[in-house]
Amino acid sequence: MHLVHAIADHDAWTLGWGLGLELHRRGERLLAGHDGGMPGYLSALVWSRRDRVACAVLSASGASGDPTALALDLVDAELADRPAAPSVWAPGDPAPPELESALGRWWLEGFEFVFSFRDGHLEARSADSQRSTKPPTVFERIDGDRFRVLSGREHGELLELDRDRSGTIERLRWAGYPATRTPEPFAPEP
């Protein structure tokens, strides 16, 4: 029903017919539908299968107005105002091996943060805001185990990773404050 069987205007190809359906081409978008009426009334129904949107226009006039043009314009307006579809999730690159022990939950003076590696950066979010839209704190490596906050909490401050003898990260120092794996209101200095 949605395949073109006849075209009204071969040069522009803006109106055609499938099996029982009118087919309207608006740029690269193909809309299907049908109009109709009876004495004193006009109507039109238009939809886009790809965009999953439809519009029905009913009018109490049999002599004026163009319900099909209005329905097409309303579909165009709806699709123009829709936000872009979110990008499809794909797993990112894994954290470099030397940062794996920095990932996970850390406590900073009674507040819990979750560190992760995304889009090539170490980042942190408050554990309370994991489901919020608040952007994470993003860190950029300066050298070795020193990072600078690019955006978010403590913007511009340093993050330093402290390792034990085996090379595992056992403590973070973020903006001068020590962060530990267990909740400690004020972490003791090593």
Image (spheres, grey):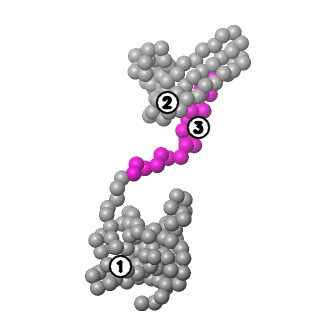
Residue corresponding to mark 1? 169
Residue under the point 50% across and 61% down = 130
Closer to the chain start, of discs 2 and 3, is 2
Separation (CA) of disc 2 from disc 3: 13 Å
SS at badge 3: helix
Mark 1 crowd level (few <14, some 14–19, many ≥20, 10 Å Cα): some
Nearest to viewer (mark 1 / mark 3): 1
CA distance separating discs 1 and 3: 54 Å
Residue 56 visible in the displayed image = yes
The residue at 46%/90% (across/down) is 189
Disc number for residue 77 = 3
Q: Nearer the viewer, residue 3 or 188?
A: 188
Tell me which label, 2 or 1, sits earlier in the chain. 2
- Quarter of the image with the C terminus in it: bottom left
Which residue is tagged 2? 48
Q: Considering the numbered disc 2 on the image, is that residue within a helix, a strand or a loop? A: strand
Q: Secondary structure at mark 1?
A: strand
Q: Residues within 10 Å of mark 3 (few under 14, many from 20)?
A: few
The residue type indicated by label 2 comes to: Ser
Toward the bottom, the furthest residue is 190
Q: In the picture, residue 120 is in which quadrant?
A: bottom left
At label 1, the amino acid type is: Ile
| Image quarter (top left, top right, bottom left or bottom right) of the N terminus | top left
Taking 120 as reference, is 25 left or right? right
Task: Give the left or right position of residue 91, taking residue 148 as reference.
Answer: left
